[in-house]
Amino acid sequence: MAARRGLLIILSSPSGAGKSSLARAIREWDPTIQFSVSATTRPAREGEADGREYHFRSHDEFNAMVKNGEMLEYATVFENLYGTPISPVEAAISAGKDVLFDIDWQGGQQIRDSELGMDAVSVFLLPPSIEELQNRLQKRAQDDDETIKRRMQKSSAEISHWAEYDYVLVNNDFDATLGQLCAILTAERQRRTRQLGLSELVRDLNTEFEARAAK
Ligand code: 5GP
């Protein structure tokens, strides 16, 4: 039996706040953390591989997954469908592995409201300023000007959901933010309710006390 149930780590932020870099770094800190690979109907960008960044699916394929109950959550983001396949998540957490989700506020809400909500810890990442957000989006150079403009508009809607999250980190300094996220995970893993076998341990400790007292 695993020593504890795995955590569902929900990481949300507006595009350009540094979420992907943070997600990569947290997995370097603990390579046992599993990254949830979402399904999406958006076309693959250069350098992205099917099954690695996303499972790239047609609308029909995506809708069939929803209909068959294969999605933990799904939502429309930037006119495309995005969703989290449930079976890898269930397998990971029952094996005591933590799963990281790079999903938007709609997905965060649905996971918190799901049966797995008690295993979730949610973190919202804020940029220090809107100027910084725009700089990071432009530097990324993956998207054209029109896409960047739309992403900036969507950012304000995403940020409006900050108060629904357990933790909020302001990404002023990447290393400091990473340190804060590691501290959150270390603490959340030690929650009494997440540790299995504690009652048995305490029972054994008491038996030992009694044995010593009887000597
Ligand atoms: P991108 O197209 O830039 O990879 O992702 C666009 C947005 O979709 C990001 O904010 C990302 O967090 C969100 N997203 C990615 N996968 C999922 C998912 O499975 N569910 C939800 N709700 N949002 C997702």
Image (cartoon, rainbow, N blue to C red):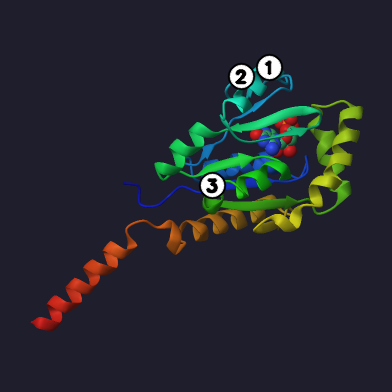
Q: Are marks 2 and 1 in contact (CB under 8 Å)?
A: no
Residue 48 on image: x %, y %: 66, 22
Tag 3 residue? 115
Residue 39 on image: x %, y %: 63, 26
Q: Quadrant of the C terminus?
A: bottom left
Along the polypeptide, which appears first: circle 2 or circle 1? 2
Q: Amino acid at mark 2?
A: Asp
What residue is drawn where x is 89% and y is 40%? 153
* Label 3 residue SS: loop
Q: Amino acid at mark 1?
A: Asp
What residue is drawn where x is 44% and y is 36%? 91
Tag 1 residue? 60
Q: Is residue 53 visible?
A: no
The answer to whether residue 53 is left or right of residue 59 is: left
Number of callouts in the render? 3
Category of crowding for the residue at label 3, using alpha-carbon neighbours closer than 10 angstroms: few (below 14), some (14–19), many (at least 20)? few
Most distant residue in the left direction: 215
Q: Is residue 147 visible?
A: yes
Numbered mark located on residue 144 in the image: none
Given residues 142 and 206, the one toward you in this image is 206
Residue 44 on image: x %, y %: 71, 20
Tag 2 residue? 50
